[in-house]
Image (cartoon, grey):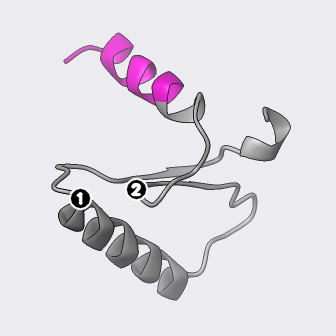
């Protein structure tokens, strides 16, 4: 896989709003590890319930600036 593959995925993800399987976190200074575990668990459980192979937790993106 090349760099463009990942750029295309990222651009596709940020072109939509958050959902049960896509979560955006600004995380400017730090991020609580307990919260990280909760997000990963919730995202993976939701992906599993929907029969999806992936869920996404995107750090460093503030969706409010684009929508």
- First in sequence, mark 2 or 1: give its number: 2
Q: Is residue 38 magenta?
A: no
- CA gap, disc 2 to disc 1? 9 Å
From the viewer's perspective, tell me whether residue 44 is left or right of residue 34.
Answer: left
Where is residue 21, by image quadrant? bottom left
Q: Which residue is mark 1?
A: 50
At which x and y percent is residue 8? 41, 17
Q: At 49% from the left edge and 88% from the top edge, which residue is drawn?
A: 34
Start-end of magenta stretch? 1-12
The label number, if any, that marks residue 13 in the structure image: none
At which x and y percent is residue 22? 47, 51
Where is residue 1, by image quadrant? top left
Instruction: Indicate whether 47 appears above or below 54.
Output: below
Image quadrant occupied by the C terminus: top right
Q: At 45% from the left edge and 73% from the top edge, which residue is drawn?
A: 39
Q: Nearer the viewer, mark 2 or mark 1?
A: 1
Q: Which residue is mark 2?
A: 21
Labelled pair 2, 1 in contact (Cβ < 8 Å):
yes
């Amino acid at each position: 896989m090349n760099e463009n593959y990942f750029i295309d995925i990222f651009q596709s993800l940020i072109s939509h709003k958050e959902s049960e399987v896509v979560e955006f976190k600004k995380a400017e200074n730090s991020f609580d590890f307990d919260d990280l575990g909760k997000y990963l668990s919730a995202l993976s459980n939701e992906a599993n319930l929907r029969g999806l192979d992936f869920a996404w937790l995107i750090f460093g993106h503030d969706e409010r600036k684009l929508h």
